[in-house]
Amino acid sequence: MHNEKAAVELEDVSLIFGGDHPADEAVLAVHDINLTIPTGQFVAVVGPSGCGKTTILNMLAGLIPATKGSVRRYGSEITGPSDDIGYMLARSALSPWRTARKNVELGMEIQGVPKNERLTKSKELLRRLRLEDFADSFPSQLSQGMNQRVAIARTLALNPDLWLMDEPFGALDAQTRLTVQAEFIELWESEGKTVIFVTHDLEEAVLLADRVIVMTARPGRIKSDTIIDLPRPRVLDELRFDEKFKEAEHRIWRELRDEIV
Amino acid sequence: MKSSDEFPREADMGGGEVTAAASPISQEEIRAMLPSQSIWQYRIRKIDIPVQLGRIALVLAIWWIWWSETIWNGWEAISIFGIQPFPNVNQVFRASPGGAWDYISKYLPESLFWSDCWVTVKEAMVGFLIASVLGIIAGLALGSFHRMSKIFGPFIIAINAMPKIAFLPLILVVYGVGEMSKVVLVVSISFFIVQVPTQAAVALVNPDLLMVSRTMGASNIQLFRKVTLPAISPAIIGGLRLAAIISIQGAIFGEIFASKRGLGQRLITSANMLDYDGLFAMVFVLALIALLFNGLIGRFEKYFLRWQTDQQSSQVISL
């Protein structure tokens, strides 16, 4: 019954906030979610704000338990945070007292990775994100886009199999977003890890993902599930103007529009 | 002949391709583009002449107002609701800068003066250290553990609201007129100055930072060491800065009230003997000690908070 090949499996998952006291309103945040994601798939989740996208990520990260149903990784139930899951937030959430390099090394420090190994890994990641010249700068000295790249490097430092990304580029300006998206997709295409990418930017979802899931307004349910059949590797600034891309985006937009408007 | 619908050449429109050299520009080349500036111009800008002139003017104004006895003569014409903020001061009570300087130069070589200094500094420093350690521990515990703050919170707020000075007679009876009573007074005042901001800062740690570390598998101890402690360090250092100054004041106050030795004792003795030059001299010495304390903590702060931007750190009142 349990699919042991699935990187992520949600079965009849519901989550209720509050309701401890009879006078306290119980909010049904997500309702009866069923979703199976195979290893190596890049899944984007879009939906109106407050539809429980972040809640699903929090459950997968082991931060909150599901009220009902089962959340599994490779057939076994998720019970708490795990170092093979990387979670990246919309805000870079870098420690202001750590340099870029030390921020990248945070997870490795927590996991007790030896110092020289940490240094090798953080240097390599910073180089891949073109930040090697800023390794010793503090977040306050870097631009928003650079900080977000440091946060990507930090998320990937522990080599997670599953990348959970909560609107990671939402806080960036349009220009910076294009560059960071392109860098990110190149990085992902070389690694091929499972990604669940929450965004409210439909264009971003279709550009990056293999599969786009549209959620309904609260209580969040899956409204549609579309495979994006565009070739890889993707060159984002060309793909943006491709007819097939536009057609896919338009099709999903019609689903999403009913939930937003 | 050109037809009218032919597009104008790009160059006419100012568009077209501009090819930029992609090769990186060296540090020397970039420097060459800067307007030339001698090292002296740089230094003069660094000194910030308006600030220095302002400081000098302020010192001269204070000096003049004191030396010329203007401040002692007062302005009795000024009266606000019958209160005269600048009354005329009797000749007997007037102190002059020269008199204060004479006092200092007379007593400076004496070892008794230095031992008085040491007594006061010791009382303030020991009290400050004990208050800091206890205040930080209490602040952290109350901030981290909800139940603890619910149990102790109301009592701590009540004790904090009590005027500590009111306990001084009791403290003197219990600990005697020696140094210990001053240390206890200092601890009772400075403890709260460290504890209150520490506790508040723990509650204000950015939840995103805690969440990120938690998803990476951090234990509670690791969350504390890698997130909470560094995040609250500016608040703790701010509290320490304030507590250092207040500790000196506490020690002096205790000494003025009742003591065997110390600068406060010296100050009140001078006042009782109508030696107001001595009183002013003591006030200056105390101000110097306070500056020294503040400077030491400033050093500490510069090192520990070097990740803050200049703007952030200048929001902390510093000398």
Image: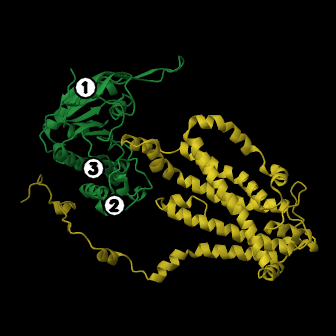
Dot 1, crowdedness within 10 Å: few (<14), some or many (≥20)?
Answer: some
Rendered image: mark on residue B294: none
Q: CA distance from mark 1 to mark 2?
A: 39 Å
Do the residues bearing badges 3 and 1 touch, measured as CB atoms within 8 Å?
no
Residue A123 versus residue A74: which sits nearer the camera?
A74
Residue type, numbered disc 3 = Val
Q: Residue at x 12, y 54 (%)?
A: B4
State the residue position of label 1: A35
Dot 3, crowdedness within 10 Å: few (<14), some or many (≥20)?
Answer: many
Rendered image quadrant of residue A70: top left
Report x, y in % for residue A202.
26, 35
Q: Earlier in the sequence, mark 3 or mark 2?
A: 2
Q: CA distance from mark 3 to mark 2?
A: 18 Å
Q: Earlier in the sequence, mark 3 or mark 1?
A: 1
Q: Residue at x 61, y 75 (%)?
A: B52
Q: Earlier in the sequence, mark 1 or mark 2?
A: 1
Point out the frontmost of discs 3 and 1.
1
State the residue position of label 2: A135
Residue type, numbered disc 1 = Leu
State the residue position of label 3: A180
